[in-house]
Image (tube, rainbow, N blue to C red):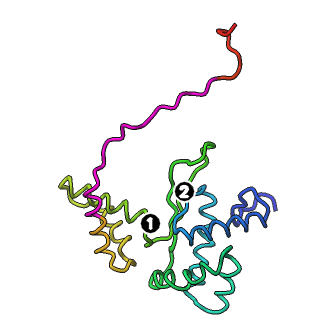
Amino acid sequence: MAGARLKYRHLGRTSSHRQALLRNLVTSLFTHESISTTYPKAKEAQRLAEKLITLGKKNTEASKRRALSIFFNPHELLPKLFGPLRERYADRPGGYTRVLRIEPLKSDQAPSAILELVDGPNDMRFAMTARTVATLRKQGRPLNEMTERNIEKVTRYREKGQRDLERMVKRMEEVEIEERNDAITIPKPRDPRPSKEDD
């Protein structure tokens, strides 16, 4: 049917290649809890990761079999999915992963993103919120509405969230953020065609 909306991103791959790619991304995500990839791949992998965590919360024999068929190294990751991750997200009704856009990583300037599990040890929003709070305290300014909302978001479902945030803020206050003066200018590549000056 020409002109119909896509149900999912095809990612320029055949069906089997696309499934293998997504399985690989999700396996890496559950291994490292944070991965960098292109934005479209991150959004597609996010869908599969959310479904896997929902299977982990069900904790039935059928859900274990389904998760076993998705992971590339299931015997390492199934205990993690049905153990610590299940406990971490027990009270959270959804939104177990987060996609954060970043500057392009590859030379082709493809839009890049970080896909991460929320409330984990490498939670990027948690660290950014702590850094913002530390900066505002250092400047003697009150917390604005957006920062207060972010504090609520990052501590709501995290066990001992307020204490962890205060600990991270203390650590951020010790770190000195200096002006970035180490940026270098990359010279433009030379045109390989002979110029008139060479004659």
Give the camera-side residue of 136 and 72. Answer: 72
Residue 19 placement (x, y as % from top left): 73, 68
Q: Which residue is mark 2?
A: 113
Left or right: 144, with 27 as reference point? left
CA distance separating discs 2 and 1: 15 Å
Q: Residue at x 66, y 75 (%)?
A: 73
Q: Are marks 2 and 1 in contact (CB under 8 Å)?
A: no
Residue farthest along the right direction in this orientation: 1
Magenta span of residues: 169-190
Q: Please, what secondary structure does the residue beneath circle 1 have?
A: loop
Q: Which residue is mark 1?
A: 122
Left or right: 162, with 39 as reference point? left
For residue 188, above or below residue 183:
above
Foreground tag (2 vs 1): 1
Residue 37 appears in which quarter of the rendering?
A: bottom right
Q: Residues within 10 Å of mark 1 (few under 14, many from 20)?
A: some
Q: Please, what secondary structure does the residue beneath circle 2 have?
A: strand
Whether the magenta-drawn stretch holds residue 91 is answered as: no
**Amino acid at pointer 2:** Ala
